[in-house]
Image (cartoon, grey):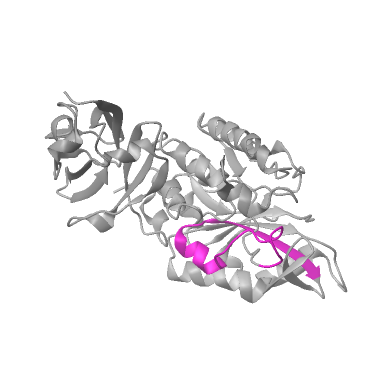
Amino acid sequence: MMASIRTDLKLTNNTPLNIARIWVNETDNYDWDGGSRPDHNFQNVNLGSYASRAEREELNYWASSAWYRLHIEFQNGDTISFRNDQYDARHDHKREIGLDGASADKYLATQISGDDWNKITISLRMPTNGWMDKIAGDRKLFELNIPGTHDTCALYGGDLAICQTQTLREQLDSGIRFVDIRCRHIENRFAIHHGIMYQHLMFGGGVRDVCLKFLEDHPRETIIMSVKHEYDDADNTRSFEDTFRWYLEGNESMWYLDETFPSLDEVRGKIVLLRRFKANTTLGIDATAWKDNATFSIVNTHEKLCIQDEYKVPTVFHIGRKWDRVKSLLEQAQEEKVNEWYLNFTSGTSAGAYPYTVAEGSPGIEGLNSHLYSYLDQLATKRIGTIIMDFPNKPIPSLVERIIASNKFSF
C-alpha cells in the first residue's frame, strides 16, 4: 500500500424515493490507496428514502485529486449522475454540485466538505415559484419549513440599512414565502422604510400589488406578510389601522385576516397577515406583543408564536453567539409541538457587524447563512419553522432551496 490519507464520503438521499442502484466509474487507480474507494464501496448499492451511507475513502498521499463519477437510479426510473473530487474532503466547501443525466433538472445536489469529510445530499428540486403545490393542503402553516426575509424591501440606505439584493418579486420567485414589511404612515399612505431610510417604494404598488400578482400567477402558493408600523408618522388624518384597511378595499378576499393559524388549503392564493401594529378589532394574527432584541413567545388563545429576534450583534466576534440563539430555536421547533409557530430571525446588525457580514461572514468567521446551510444537512424533513434571513442568496445561492427541500412533499 502507498502512503494514504483517510477521508470519508457520505451520501444522503433526502427524497421520498428509494434509490434502486448506485454505481461509480471514471476513477483513476493512482488517486486511491487500497480498496477503500467509491468504485468499490459505493458500487451497486441501494439507499432508502431519507437515508444516508458513509464510507471510508483512502486517498493516495501523493495525488492532488481523486475524481469519480457517481450514478444514481431512483425507484421511479429517474437517473442522475455527478462528477466529484474526493480531495474536496481536505478543504471547506459549501455549494451546489452540477448534475447530469435525463432527470438532472428534477434534483438538487449539495456538498459540504472539510475536516476530511465529503458530504453530498440529494434532494428534490421543487419549482421555487410553486413549491407549495406539492404539500398536503391539510397541513398547518406552522408545520411547514418556510424561507423568509427580514426587512424584505431594504435595498437602499448604505451598509447598515441594506438587508437584501433581490426585489420582492425576485424573492417570491426564488421561494421566499414570509415577507417582513415595514411601513411608515405618511399622508394617509404607507411608505416602505427601514428605520429612517425610505426604500423608494410605496405599499400599494410596490408591495401589495406585487404579492397579489404573484398569487394570481401561482394560485396554490401563499404569502405570510408581517406588517410593522415603522419610523415616525407624518401628516395623517386617520389611524394606521384605518389606512391598512383602506389598502384592503377591493381585494379583501385575497387576504387571510383571521387570528388563528390556518391550514395551507385555507390560504392558497392569499396573503396571511401577521400584524405588528395596533388594531381595535380582529385583524390577522396578532403579534403586537413583540419584544425588542429577544427570544420570546406570544400566546393568543390556544396558539403560540415562538420568536427569536435577537438582532443586536455588537461585533463580528459575536456572530457565533447569534448562531447559538438561532440554533436553540431550531432545536425547539423539532419537538413539533402542536399550535406553536416558530419564527427564527438569522438577521443581525450593528456598527461593528453590518447585516451582510452577519449573513455572509468575514475572513475566519462563518456567517449565519453558512451555519444554517450546514445545519440543514443533518435534518432530513424535521420541522424547523419559518426562517427569516438577510441576503439568503449569499454566499450560497441554493440556501432557500435547501430549506424548501426539508419539507414533506406529497406525490
Q: Is residue 337 visible?
A: no
Q: Is residue 207 visible?
A: yes
Q: Residue furthest top?
A: 1
Query: Is residue 273 or residue 380 the one in the foreground?
Result: 380
User: Percent from the top left, x then y, of residue 198?
Assistant: 74, 69
**Left or right: residue 135 compared with residue 302:** left
Query: Is residue 222 or residue 15 the one in the foreground?
Result: 15
For the point 61% across and 69% down, the residue is 208
Q: Quadrant of the N terminus?
A: top left
**Left or right: residue 336 compared with residue 93:** right
Residue 50 sits above or below residue 411 on the image: above
Chain part drawn in magenta: 156-185
Residue 357 sits above or below residue 6 on the image: below
For the point 14% across and 45% down, the residue is 26
Q: Find residue 159 and report its image quarter.
A: bottom right
Residue 212 sits above or below residue 54 on the image: below
**Left or right: residue 156 compared with residue 54:** right
Q: Find residue 226 and report its image quarter.
A: bottom right
User: Percent from the top left, x then y, of residue 252?
Assistant: 61, 67
The number of callouts visible is 0
Query: Is residue 49 or residue 8 the one in the foreground?
Result: 8
Magenta stretch holds residue 157: yes
For the point 16% across and 26% down, the residue is 34
Q: Residue furthest front?
A: 62
User: Percent from the top left, x then y, of residue 313?
Assistant: 71, 43
User: Percent from the top left, x then y, of residue 70?
Assistant: 19, 43
